[in-house]
Amino acid sequence: MNTLINGIFKRDMALAFRQRSELAQPLMFLLMVITLFPLGIGPGPVTLQKIGPGVIWIAAILSSLLAMERLFRDDFWDGSLEQYMLSGQSVAAIAAVKVLVHWLVSFLPLALFSPLLALFLNLTVDMYIALMLTLVLGTPLLSLVGAIAVGLTVGLQRGGVLLALLLIPVFIPLLIFATSAVDSAALQLPYRAQLAIIGAMLMLAMASAPFAIAYALKVSQN
Amino acid sequence: MWKWLHPYAKPERAYQLCVTLQPYFLWPGILCLVAGSIWGLAFAPQDYQQGDSFRIIYIHVPSAILSMSTYVAMAVAALVGIVWQWRTAFMAMIAMAPIGAVVTFIALFTGAAWGKPMWGTWWVWDARLTSELILLFLYLGVIALYGAFEDKQQAGKAAGVMALVGVVNVPIIHYSVEWWNTLHQGATISKFDKPSIAPEMLWPLLIALLGLALFIAAVTVMRMKNEIIRREYHRPWVKDLAARALGDDHAV
């Protein structure tokens, strides 16, 4: 079991880092979407600070939707997903490892990238710290819940837009709590409650999502 | 204890059950809906503040309540289908999805029509309006996912997973949005200990609620019958059924 998990982890990491352009593209997209906002709304520092947290989170969700598909797509088309299902090992554990790798390669860079975004949108240091905390707690939730929908749509020819339709309504609570945490930080108010709720949602997803992903993959393999 | 339920996993028995249940849902449903609407729209007393425009409550509140309940019923059907591997449960689920979406749309539309005279605007980003809108998106997601698959058995399972993900999210969405913004008045009839609505206004509302619930059940049963026939049309029992129906037509 452990060898398998280790092997998948190393294989997926190696694959991700050998397709660097695919890793970089969502980040470039994120940066460009965020650039659009000052251009479209106006460069006033007060306005930017007001909309900043929401803009960063919305851009993060949109760019994650673009990159989400690669979570299982290649494995589905080259047949390795089928081999995982036949291996007799727990598919939930395999799915959990794949989600972990996905988070490490697509959201961790985003979190590291966020100081730049905070500068662009004129966030204060307090707001930036809150944003960082919500990103660290919230993005694994995007990966976990997103993986369920990716598992369901992986066998479809054109799953991309459908994936967005399925996931955007599900991500709304996260967006609300995350931006409200950053807004509270802007007013020097405590934001532990929001972080605690995001954490609770993350725990719930960590406990149940791997099994849902495993079932979704089984449905897709038929 | 649950043994009496198992035969209904078979499409033929489920179809028969639908045929039996349909009149019990349909006629009382229509009756209650008509009675509740006429009583509410024409005979219930005016509201002392909102005048006659409050009467849309007799359509708005039943549809708002039942849009949520239909989603929960859909998720229960999906859970039954996933746990006990019932094909008929997925058929029931997908039979309910468009009905729920329509009821949600009615709730949103009547809410907007009520908001215009009361709040002075068609739409506000208020907690309940927003969560109702998100509920509509969840319904549309389930329907879209179901439509994307060629193989309808696979489609049912996939849509079922999404319905379950949605139902976990419905309370979270509800409370998150509530926290986010609130303008809507508090619930009027869920406070069972002491309803803050006059009894002569409450009764037609309850009758309309019951009527809409029965009507939704009747349409679900009708759609489920169609769904079963569509999937099983090559089976002997469906062919027998068709032959009998055709025979009747010729007799007439």
Image: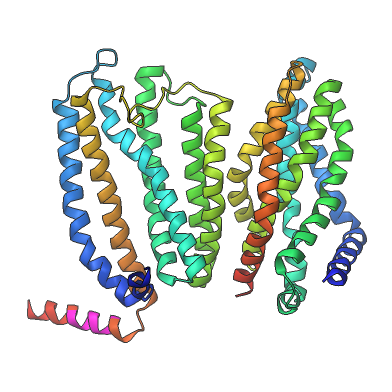
Q: Report whether A195 appears left or right of B246.
A: right
* Farthest-out residue, top: B49
Q: Residue A90: horizontal and vertical position, in percent? A: 72, 70
Q: Residue at x 50, y 36 (%)?
A: B131
User: In which quadrant of the rendered image does the C terminus of chain A lie?
Assistant: bottom right
Q: How is the image coloured?
A: rainbow
- Where is residue B32, by image quadrant? top left
* B53 lies above or below B37: above
* Farthest-out residue, bottom: B236
B86 or B91: nearer the viewer: B86
- Where is residue A169, by image quadrant? top right
* Farthest-out residue, left: B252
Residue A42 in sight here: no
Residue A130 in sight here: yes
Q: Residue B49: horizontal and vertical position, in percent? A: 29, 13
Q: Report whether B97 appears left or right of A23.
A: left
Q: Report whether A219 appears left or right of B233.
A: right
Q: Residue B72: horizontal and vertical position, in percent? A: 44, 50
Q: Count numbered badges in the picture.
A: 0
* B55 lies above or below B250: above
User: In which quadrant of the rendered image does the N terminus of chain A lie?
Assistant: bottom right
Magenta residues span: B238-244
Q: Residue at x 46, y 26 (%)?
A: B123
* Farthest-out residue, front: B1
Q: Report whether B187 appears left or right of B249.
A: right
Q: Residue A205: horizontal and vertical position, in percent? A: 67, 50
In the image, is residue B205 part of the stretch drawn in magenta?
no
Main secondary structure found in the magenta portion? helix
Q: Residue at x 32, y 62 (%)?
A: B223
